[in-house]
Image: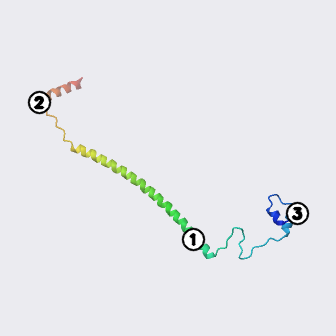
Amino acid sequence: MSDDPAFLWDSPRPIGGQAIRRAQREPSPEPGPLEPKGRDAVLVPVDEWGRILRQLGNLHDAGQQMAEARERAARAETESEFLKERLKDLRDQLAVAKEIADRPPPEPEPMPTWGEWLTRRWLERRKAKR
């Protein structure tokens, strides 16, 4: 095992106590005021950062508006389907009503003669007494 510090930091095996003490004694280089503090950090001007955040906010608002528009469209589609079904039912009812209206009126029953009426009345009373 080498005492080279670069080897110790890149080693997949655990580092021994002597190498840790040596690493603690050596000061780590602090980043300067214009250097990023992490490996993946990038310097961005404040104005640009604010513009980017505003754009993200606008995208978020646009996404919410899109979701609301989709909900309204779904509600409108459902209402449209309901109204189409209701219109179909009303047209069917209208067709039935027209069919009934187009029928000729029924023929009135012929008036019974005096003798027929008297016989029926007598039979009805006789049944009612029993």
For the residues marked 2 and 3, what is the alpha-carbon distance in whole angstroms?
A: 137 Å
Q: Residue under circle 2? A: 114
Please give left or right for residue 30 compared with residue 3 in the image: left
Q: Secondary structure at mark 2?
A: helix
Instruction: Check residue 91 in the rendering and tell me which mark sits there, or answer none.
Output: none
Q: Residue under circle 3? A: 18
Instruction: Check residue 54 in the rendering and tell me which mark sits there, or answer none.
Output: 1
Position in image of residue 100 (x %, y %): 24, 43
| Chain-order first, disc 2 or disc 3 | 3
In contact (CB < 8 Å): disc 1 and disc 3: no
Position in image of residue 56 (x %, y %): 57, 68
- Tell me the quarter of the picture where residue 32 sits: bottom right
Please give left or right for residue 72 compared with residue 56 in the image: left
Few, some or many C-alpha atoms within 10 Å of disc 3 (few <14, some 14-19, many ≥20)? few
Please give left or right for residue 75 compared with residue 113 in the image: right
For the residues marked 1 and 3, what is the alpha-carbon distance in whole angstroms?
A: 51 Å
- Please name the colour scheme applied to the rendered image: rainbow
At label 1, which amino acid type do we have?
Arg
In the picture shown, does residue 72 fall above or below 48?
above
Position in image of residue 6 (x %, y %): 81, 66
Q: Secondary structure at mark 3?
A: helix
For the residues marked 1 and 2, what is the alpha-carbon distance in whole angstroms?
A: 100 Å
Between disc 1 and disc 3, the foreground one is 3
| Chain-order first, disc 1 or disc 3 | 3
Q: Nearer the viewer, residue 38 or 85?
A: 38
- Outermost residue toward the left in this view: 114
Q: Quadrant of the N terminus?
A: bottom right
Residue, x 84% and y 60% (percent of image)?
A: 15
Between disc 1 and disc 2, the foreground one is 1
Q: How many marks?
A: 3
| Chain-order first, disc 1 or disc 2 | 1
Residue, x 11% and y 28% (percent of image)?
A: 115
